[in-house]
Amino acid sequence: MRRLLGDAVLHTTRVWHDLKSGLDGFFFAPADPTALGLIRIITGLLAFWSLFVLGLDLEAYLGRGSWASADLVWHAQRPLQWSIWFLVPDALLRPAWVACLGVLALFAAGAFSRVTAVLAWVIIVSTVRRSPASVFGFDQVLSMLLFYLAVTGASGQSVSFDRFWKRWRQARAITLARPPRYRPDGLGRQVEPTIPGKPRPSISANLTIRLIQLHLALIYATAGLAKLQGVSWWNGEATWRIIAAGEFVGFNLTALARWPNLLAALTHLSLALELLYPVLIWPWRTRPFVLLGVVALHAGIGIVNPGLAEFGVAMLGANLAFVSGRYLRSLATASEQPALRVLFDGACPRCRGWMALLAASDPDQILEPVDLTAVDVRKIHPTLTPEACMEAMHVVDTQGRVASGFDAFRTIAGWLPLYWPFAAFGHVPGVAVVGRIGYNRIAASRPRDVACNDDVCGIHSRPSPKPLRDRGGPHPPKSTSSTQEDPLRRRAADD
Amino acid sequence: MGRGLARTKPSDGRGADPAAGSGVWPAWQKRLVGAALAFHLAALFAGAIGSEPSSPLEQRLARFFTPYFDLADLGYSYRFYVEPPATPIAIATLHFEDGRPEQKIRIPERVVAGPPLRRQRQLALAHALLLDAQDARTTTGRSSQSRLARSFADRLCRLYPGCGQVTWQITLHQIPDRGDVIEALDTPSVGRFDLFDESLFTTPEWVGDFPCAGS
């Protein structure tokens, strides 16, 4: 008997220690915050959109005489429920709404993210509480995500304006430094920030991700288990009931009535996905399949029921918590880094400023800035000449393709997610024509640090409108001799 | 895909972002946060199991966390689409004192300009009215005691000057039986089934008559 009791105590102690150690690793190990940054963007944009749409009928939902009047909601509330909208008189409703949209936009961008995350949560919860008659599942998911992003304060640790601003300020300070700072690899003036581009793992990011993961598992589990009460989920009719709900659907899909087995299969698969999600989402082998199923489920619901599209996007955004930061970053970067070598005029303050901006926007080091005054450009690509490079910025990709001037900027924009909209705009017919003219004018009139008294600099056909200045300081280390080793290759070998 | 999709194995903390706090938390901090996590996760679980149908124990557990739910807007049951239901439609009939003909307002409107989310909010309004009317009927025996119906009526009274009384009714937009749809589709003259066919709407159920203030 004593032996049995002793073994039981020993086993329990071991289990307890294993559990403690497991939970410690689960909750308190640093994690990559990249997914969290993307969740913040999606949640922020959805919150902005939700409030914007509500603003189309602002008085009807948030005014004193709304459908659910302020008096009614106020008196129906329990003591600890709250909403800032009760404090806003009707006359100030529109300005307050605009201010709230501004806060949500800042939050989505990741600006002042610790503060705006809390404010965003306050705004959305206040709206839900003020207009309880108009809420549905979308609001619950939005509120949940904002709660975690606000409580842990980790939402701005990646893919955020805060981070970009910090790196840009540092990069600009480096480009303006006196004496000038040069790269140790012999590639000329330094324009990149020294703050690492890739976000470092943090415990607060891990906590947020874990809480979202657990909450999602709970949502799918309860949704799936509850459906077991419904007859239509057993007899395979549930999908039919969803696609034939006239008030909800965007398209008439009643022709599918002839395909009962398809409808039943979709019903059973949806239910199986929700029931199995809490189990199969954790092992890495099954996770991709579960995530694909989730994408199919929510995309399907969103297409059939357009009013639930935002709900689907919120759920898909939340599911990013199960995707690794490395994988997410790889979607926006090349398999080989750097993907682009950017040749810029290191003696031109404006060029350095632009390169600092681009480098700050490039956390994954897709670009490799190369100061053309410090290297032999022919070694980078045989078709390049110092004269051409001095006329316009050039980029060379890993395939050996070269672009220059406005086209180079457009190529760079296509590689950096922050500038994708500009890249798309650059392909609008006519924009490139105007862009090239504008670029060439700006490039031809750019100021330079050193007096233009050598062969290379003398190539400029038009004199600079500003007097060329020699601000002193050490000249960049030269590595242009054809007998010297290509510094780019040397660096690659070092890597 | 594959392993790449999975979250990276947490590192040992040496690379933690200084701005985000220390890579390794002290024991007291972990204990404090661990206790908060335990409370929060227990609350989530209680909220999920606490709504009907549930046992008295589950309900009691959920009630324990009610203050937390109220503060943090949590405690939802997430029981979406247990049985995809017929859709409630609220119909208001406005009676004018100046002899104008009656006017009917439908919530949700058949067509709402703008994004679908805007109409989804109206669908939620009708659903809330249905629940409140049912609740009023259960607790007082009369759906006309619904405070939400009163509030909805007050709004319409303000929006339509001269309106003396608002009558609320609720009809259910039913989901057609699949067999009936196939039968209709097999009829040569029917190109496609009309999901807004009048036969799919139940007879409107009276909620209450609500006189406008000052009328």
Image: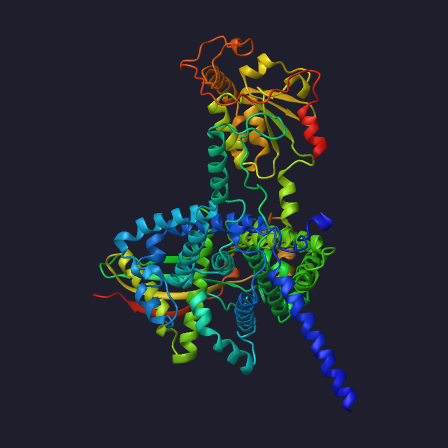
Q: Residue at x 67, y 25 (%)?
A: A487
Describe residue A183's horizontal placement relative to residue A162 as left or right: right
For the residue pair A17 and B162, the one nearer the viewer reads as A17
Looking at the image, residue A17 lies above or below residue A49: below
Q: Quadrant of the N terminus of chain A?
A: bottom right
Looking at the image, residue A96 lies above or below residue A228: above
Query: Could you tell me residue A150's position as x and y percent?
Result: 47, 57
For the residue pair A294 and A401, the one nearer the viewer reads as A401
Query: Could you tell me residue A446's position as x and y percent?
Result: 46, 18
Is residue B204 visible in the rendered image? The answer is no
The type of colouring in the image is rainbow
Q: Quadrant of the C terminus of chain A?
A: top right
Is residue A356 visible in the rendered image? The answer is yes
Query: Could you tell me residue A435's position as x and y percent?
Result: 49, 21
Query: Could you tell me residue A45's position as x and y percent?
Result: 48, 47
Q: How many marks?
A: 0
For the residue pair A63 and A248, the one nearer the viewer reads as A63
Residue extending furthest toward the bottom: A1
For the residue pair A288 and A172, the one nearer the viewer reads as A172
In which quarter of the view is residue A232 placed? bottom right
